[in-house]
Image (cartoon, grey):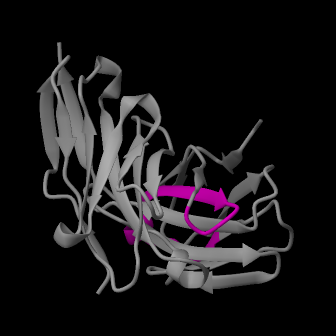
Amino acid sequence: AQSVTQPDIHITVSEGASLELRCNYSYGATPYLFWYVQSPGQGLQLLLKYFSGDTLVQGIKGFEAEFKRSQSSFNLRKPSVHWSDAAEYFCAVGGNGGSQGNLIFGKGTKLSVKP
Amino acid sequence: NAGVTQTPKFRILKIGQSMTLQCTQDMNHNYMYWYRQDPGMGLKLIYYSVGAGITDKGEVPNGYNVSRSTTEDFPLRLELAAPSQTSVYFCASGIGANVLTFGAGSRLTVL
């Protein structure tokens, strides 16, 4: 079955520290992978996506993610966290076209940032 | 640029009442979606549409209905509201199936 696992429900990091949010997926075909961010009371905003090619993808707000097919992972990283990064982060997987393109979301990781 | 607009933002319903959540997008996107978000559960797909006149069920369609008479609008109808439908509902649209623009959400409480 297709699924996305985000092992960490809540992570707290200090401002200026590095960040890595984990995401593992199970998908039968070539996956399209995404990270979305949700600020409190808001909708989701796309941070970055991976379709094919270079396995290290850059996104907005200084985020990057690396696709590792052998580990079925797509972890999100940021070298130096800012207080404004406090939000909930969702990893998602989808396929190519039709109903296969419908996204499957993980349960999310809430990020808190300490001053 | 309005993007995806959802109304209402908040609503309280009594058990058994009906209501429609409105969703409009001004980006000429073919794909539109309704998700529900429950605490700690991520987003679950309720219904989706790949174009005007075409709709299909997602993972959790029971208790809901949709229509897509125009490219811009994708209303979600709740018939006979139940406490289990208490949730935050998000509408989203996209040119393709994957890269989505989300609305700000509609918080529904059924008492």
Reply above or below: A53 against A98.
Answer: above
Of the 4 image quadrants, the one containing the N terminus of chain B is top right
Q: Is residue B81 magenta?
A: yes
Q: Is residue A89 magenta?
A: no
Q: Residue at x 35, y 21 (%)?
A: A84
Q: Residue furthest right?
A: B70
Q: Residue furthest top?
A: A115
Q: Residue at x 82, y 60 (%)?
A: B72
Q: How many discs appear?
A: 0
Looking at the image, can residue B111 be seen? no
Left or right? Give the position of B108 relative to A97: left
Reply above or below: B77 against B42.
Answer: below
Quadrant location of residue A24?
Answer: bottom left
Residue A62 place in picture, x, y as percent: 38, 29
Residue B44 place in picture, x, y as percent: 42, 69
Which residue is more in the foreground, A21 or A8? A21
Left or right? Give the position of A27 relative to B13: left
Left or right? Give the position of B28 relative to A11: right
Residue A66 place in picture, x, y as percent: 29, 52
Quadrant location of residue B10?
Answer: top right
Residue A94 place in picture, x, y as percent: 45, 72
Which residue is more in the foreground, B96 or B7? B96
Q: Residue at x 71, y 76 (%)?
A: B50
Looking at the image, can residue B60 be seen? yes
Which region shows up in magenta?
B77-98
Q: Residue at x 20, y 24 (%)?
A: A113
